[in-house]
Image (cartoon, rainbow, N blue to C red):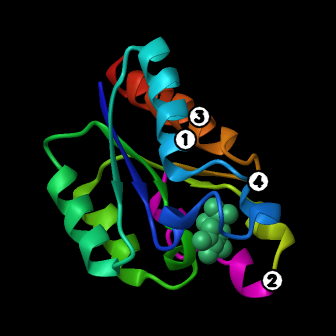
Amino acid sequence: MKILVINGPNLNMLGTREPEKYGTKTLKDIESYISEEADKLGIEVNFYQSNIEGEIVNKIQEAKGIYDGIVMNPAAYTHTSVAIRDAITAVKLPVAEIHISNIHTREDFRKISLTAPACVGQITGFGAVSYKLGLIAISDYIKSLKD
Ligand code: DQA
C-alpha cells in the first residue's frame, strides 16, 4: 500500500511556529514519526509540503494511479479551498484530513472545513499523533475496500 502525506501552508515552520498550539516537533520530526508507524504497518509513505494552493491541487491530481490514499493536513486551506476539495473529489482517492490542533475549539472561521466533506473522515486535536491516527485510519479504510 502506498500513502501520500500532504502538508499545507506554514507547516514547514512547525517547531518554531506557535509551539503552544502546534508543539515543538519540526516537520522533519513528524515525517520520521509517520515513517516509523508506516514501517510497522508495512505501508510505503511519501511526503509533500507546499505553501501554494495550486501546487497542492497538482500533487493530488498526480497521486491518482500512484497512491492508494492520502493523509492530508491542508492547514489554512482547510477553511478556504474549494480547489483542493474539488481535486480530492475529482481523483476519487480516499483522504484522511488531519489537524494538529482541535479546529473546533478555535476561532469560528477554523471550525469550518471546506475540504473535510470530500474526505473519508477528519482527525483533529491530537498533536503529532493526529498524523499517526490518520495513517492507521486511511490504511484500514483502504483494506476494507479490498475485503
Ligand atoms: C491546522 C489548523 C489550521 O486552522 C491552521 O491554519 C494550520 C494548522 C492544524 O494542524 O491544527 O495551519 O491545520
C-alpha gap between disc 1 and disc 2: 27 Å
Q: Nearer the viewer, residue 115 or 35?
A: 35
Residue 136 visible in the shown view: yes
At x 75%, y 46%, the residue is: 126
**Picture mark count:** 4
Q: Are marks 4 and 3 in contact (CB under 8 Å)?
A: no
Residue at numbered disc 3: 132
Q: Image quarter for residue 23? A: bottom right
* Mark 4 CB within 8 Å of ligand 1: yes
Which badge, 4 or 2, comes first in the chain's sequence? 2
Residue 117 is a magenta residue: yes
Tell me the residue that label 4 is attached to.
Answer: 125
Neighbours of disc 4 within 10 Å: few (<14), some (14-19), many (20+): some
**Which circle marks residue 82 in the picture?**
none
Mark sitting earlier along the chain (4/3): 4
- Residue 51, quarter of picture: bottom left
* Helix, strand or loop status at disc 1: helix
Alpha-carbon span between mark 3 and mark 2:
25 Å
Q: Amino acid at mark 1?
A: Asp
Question: Which of label 1 and label 2 is nearer to you?
Answer: 1
Q: Is residue 37 magenta?
A: no
Q: Which residue is mark 2?
A: 107
Where 21 sits versus 77, above or below?
above
The boundaries of the magenta stretch are 107-119
